[in-house]
Image (cartoon, grey):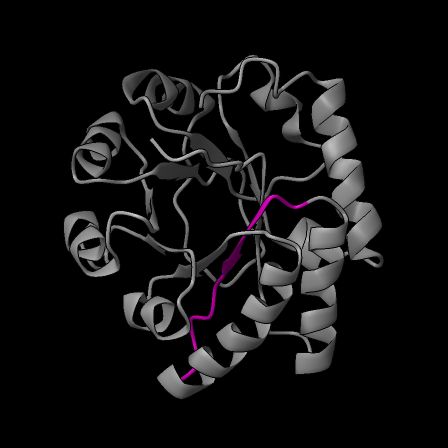
Amino acid sequence: MKDLDTRLYFITDSSDFSEEEFLYRVEEGILGGATILQLREKEKTTREYIDIASKVHKITKKYNVPLIIDDRVDVALAIDAEGVHVGKCDMPVSMARKLMGEDKIIGATAKTVPQAKEAYSMGADYLGVGAIYPTTTKVKTVLTSVETLREICGSVPIPVNAIGGLNKDNIDILKGIPIAGICVVSAIMKAENPQKATARIIERIKELEMWKDVKR
């Protein structure tokens, strides 16, 4: 099993920003303590996706933070990203693993225990589970109960991250569940000060002792 640190999994959203502002916010989130970053671009062309991914990768490599590309194995391969995240409508985990190789990180979305077990059996290194709360992103989501999240954590030996509308004020609901971390989008991307916002989320997680029993 890879030694992944997914405690604060930062997912980007560039839709409301200029490229300069977007890249600034990416770096600020990392400086604030994000441990892994996913570049999510649903509407860019392949060339546009590769271009922004290359720029983001320069930032993440500077701070030794893994870059995960959402959906697109071709983009991940083109820029030699550290990994890719695939959803239920994307390329199967087993095929992504075959193309990416054993050394790369493969993440998968799971909303049920059977989906979690299947993703693990196909070679996923970690899971994203949610949405815990309704989100303000443009990604369509279906809510996942906290109890289902707990069951998924107990069904697989790989890191499980909660995702969906999470911020420093509403993560109390996750206390006591053996997740490896939380995924955050808007709470960082839309913050007035992304670095401080990221640091506050980490402080809140520590206060709740949510990392005490992290699954590795």
Residue 53 picture location, percent across and down? 50, 73
Specify start and end residues of the magenta stretch as a single range: 34-45
Residue 46 picture location, percent across and down? 36, 83
Q: Would residue 18 be seen by someone viewing this image from the given angle? A: no
Residue 149 picture location, percent across and down? 41, 25
Q: Does the magenta stretch include residue 35?
A: yes
In this image, 146 relative to 156: left or right? right
Residue toward you, 15 or 86: 86
Q: Would residue 165 be seen by someone viewing this image from the given angle? A: yes
In this image, 125 relative to 193: left or right? left
Residue at position x 22%, y 56% in the image: 96
Residue at position x 38%, y 35% in the image: 2
In this image, 127 relative to 133: left or right? left
- Our reading of the magenta stretch's main secondary structure is loop
In this image, 71 relative to 202: left or right? left
Residue 99 found in image quarter? bottom left
